[in-house]
Amino acid sequence: MAQDRTYPPAPAPLPAPVTDNHSHIEPQQHFPAAPLTLDQQVAAAAAVGVSRIVQCGCDLEAARWTAKVAVKAPAVVGAIAIHPNDAARLAKTGGYAAALAELAELAAGEPRIRAIGETGLDYFRTGPAGRPAQLAAFGDHIALAKELDLALQIHDRDAHADVIAALDRDGAPERTVFHCFSGDREMAALAASRGWYCSFGGVVTFKSAGELRAAVSELPPELVLVETDAPYLTPEPFRGRPNAPYLIPQTMRVLAEQMGFELERACRQVQENTTRVYGDW
Ligand SMILES: [Zn+2]
C-alpha cells in the first residue's frame, strides 16, 4: 500500500497550552502531499492548545527562513544549526567554515533565535569517516550556544556515549535539550543528574517504546519537554502520516500518564519548562 501523505485529523484539544519545542515547518519539506502554510500550521496548533512553536532550521536555507519567520509570526521562535549529517557533508566539500560563520551571524543578530540546534552526533546516517567532522561541528555549536547564551538542542542518533562525553568535556550550555530523547532509564537518570532537559516526540506513543516511556517516569517533571520533530515521527494512531505541531496532544497525553500527572497539570509543567529554556514569547 502506498504511504498516506495526507495530514491526520485534529485530536481533541489540550486543557492548557503547551509548546512544540522542536519542529520543522519550513516550506521545502517534501513529505506531506500538500504542506500546510506557516499560517495554517500556527492556526491548527493554536486550535488544539499548542500555543507556541520552536521552528528548527538545520541547514543554511532553512536557518535563513527560520530567522525571518521568527520575526514575522508571534507564535514562533527559532533554533538554527548545521545538522551533524550536513556538517560531515560540508566538511568534505570545504563549505563548512563559511556556513558556520553565516549561522553565527544569524543567531547573534536576531533575538527571536532562542537556540542552537539541532547539533550533535548521528552515527546512523554518517559512517566512521564523517565522525571527526561531526565531533568538531558539535564542539563549535556548543561554544556558539554558550557565547550567545542560547539553549542547545541536541540530535543524538546511536551516539549516546560520545554525545555525553563531548558535553562533559566542553561543558554543556546552561539550557541543554536532548531533542527526540531516545535513551533508556539509565540515560534519563544521567541527564537528570546534569540538569539536561529531555524532549519527547511521537515515538513515545509507539507500542514498542516501553523503555522510552519508562525514561519519562525517571525524570524530574521540571526537565520534560514535548515536540513533534514534524514532518516525521507522527504519534499513534497516525504513525506513518505527515506530522505537524497540531498533533502534539496525543503525545502530551502519554507524557502526562508517565509523569504521573493529570493532563492539565502536565501541560502547565511542560509549558513552564519550555519558557525556562527558551525565554518567553
Ligand atoms: Zn529535528
Image (cartoon, rainbow, N blue to C red):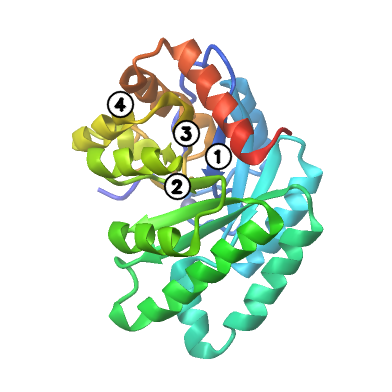
Q: Is residue 23 above or below residue 63?
A: above
What residue sits right under mark 4 in the picture? 217
Callouts 3 and 4 close, C-beta under 8 Å = no
Label 3, label 2: how many angstroms apart (C-alpha)?
Answer: 9 Å
- Residue 173 spot, x, y in % from top left: 56, 53
Q: Amino acid at mark 3?
A: Val
Label 1, label 3: how many angstroms apart (C-alpha)?
Answer: 6 Å
Callouts 1 and 3 close, C-beta under 8 Å = yes
Label 3, label 4: how many angstroms apart (C-alpha)?
Answer: 14 Å
For marks 1 and 2, the one nearer the N-term is: 1
Callouts 1 and 4 close, C-beta under 8 Å = no
What residue sits right under mark 1 in the picture? 21
Considering depth in this image, is 131 or 3 the residue closer to the camera? 131
Residue 226: image tag: 3
For marks 3 and 2, the one nearer the N-term is: 2
For marks 2 and 4, the one nearer the N-term is: 2
| SS assignment at label 4 | helix
What residue sits right under mark 2 in the picture? 179
Q: Nearer the viewer, mark 3 or mark 4?
A: 4
In which quadrant is the C terminus drawn? top right
